[in-house]
Image (spheres, rainbow, N blue to C red):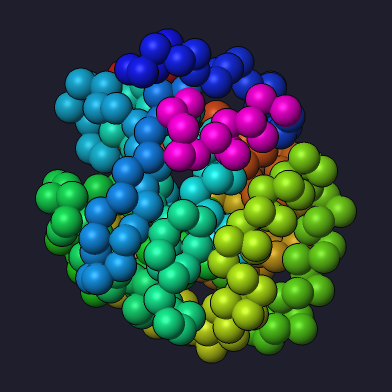
Amino acid sequence: MNPTGEPEESTRLTPAGRFGPAELRLAMAAPRSAAGLTSEWRLVDGLRTHTRRGADPGTGAPPVVLLHGLAVSHRYLTALAVALSPTHPVYVPDLPGFGLSEHPRGAYDVAAHAEHVAAWLAAYRLPPVCLLGHSFGAEVAAALAANHPDAVRALVLAGPTSDPSARSRTALFGRWLVDCLREAPLQAPILVRDVWNARPWRVLATLSHSVHNAIEADLVRVTAPTLVVTGARDPVVPAPWRDEATRLVPDADLVVVPGAAHNVVTTAPTQVADACRRLLTPHPALLIR
């Protein structure tokens, strides 16, 4: 039961590597409470910013902040937030113009999103966090970690865009179409809802910002311990680029999840959560499972 006395959404999720009706219900639940996650809004740099968050489990572990990718929102990261919540305080903000956050006048580029997240961290008065960004969110996370190193204890780049060998809207869109054929079909309602919330023009404008962002310049300046996580079947982040991205960061390791495509954070939340715990735990034998 949640604090209002209403029943929580089911937390019995489908097996790792899949995305089923339980995950879809959790993803679409906000702003209602579900599986220990609640919604709240704070004014950050003049914008009413929505955050989906879990309760502090009282373990003393550092907070984990999840940043969503292009066109989407907190929704597709919900299963990962649930997987992390037994051991870490988890926060999933919606970037300006996406999800349930207020729309700014224009579409923010990577640098503007990174500065907004930095202001969001200050508003929450969080200690140095484990920052996980997926896809376009990984570009934002890399920029924040490079420019605000004191705010980031550890960095996870999940399916980081964009590959320099395919840095155009046409190339990225083509790879995304291939990825759609490899993803669990029940993710589609989330994408439709998120694009409707953001508006198609904002999605296209943000895509343009992504292809003009040289993430390599930020990766080489990251000082936090870093993990690059990709799906083995990810056409958006092929093997040569994931290897190069890992090499560019001074202190980085690579995890490739078998069977997963680009949305590895959605279809393999348990594996990604365990990888985050290993990054944050000096002694893997002491991991809390």
Magenta span has 114? no
Residue 180 position in % (x across, y down): 81, 56
Image x and y of residue 117, in percent:
30, 63
With respect to residue 239, does 113 lie above or below? below
Q: Is residue 117 above or below residue 158?
A: below
Q: Residue at x 25, y 54 (%)?
A: 42
The residue nearer to you, when weighing 131 against 277, is: 131
- Point out residue 77 in the picture as x, y percentages from the top left corner: 53, 43
Q: Relative to residue 72, is residue 126 drawn left or right?
A: left
Q: Quadrant of the C terminus?
A: top left
Q: Quadrant of residue 234?
A: bottom right
Q: Position of residue 197 (x, y in %)?
A: 58, 61
**Which residue shows up at 40% across the image and 76% down it?**
104
Instruction: Tell me what residue is drawn at x 27 percent, y 22 percent.
Output: 57
Visible residue check, residue 172: yes
User: In the image, is 228 to the left or to the right of 232?
Assistant: left
* Image-quadrant location for residue 169: bottom right
Q: Residue at x 29, y 27 (%)?
A: 55
In the displayed structure, would residue 93 be above or below residue 259? below
Q: Is residue 32 left or right of residue 53?
A: right
Q: How many numbered badges does the structure rendering display?
A: 0
Tell me, yes or no, if residue 243 can be seen here: no
Stretch in magenta: 21-34
Along the viewing direction, whichever of 23 and 200 lies nearer the viewer: 200
Which image quadrant is residue 123 in?
bottom left
Tell me the quadrant of the picture where the N terminus can be found.
Answer: top left
209 and 224: which one is in front? 209
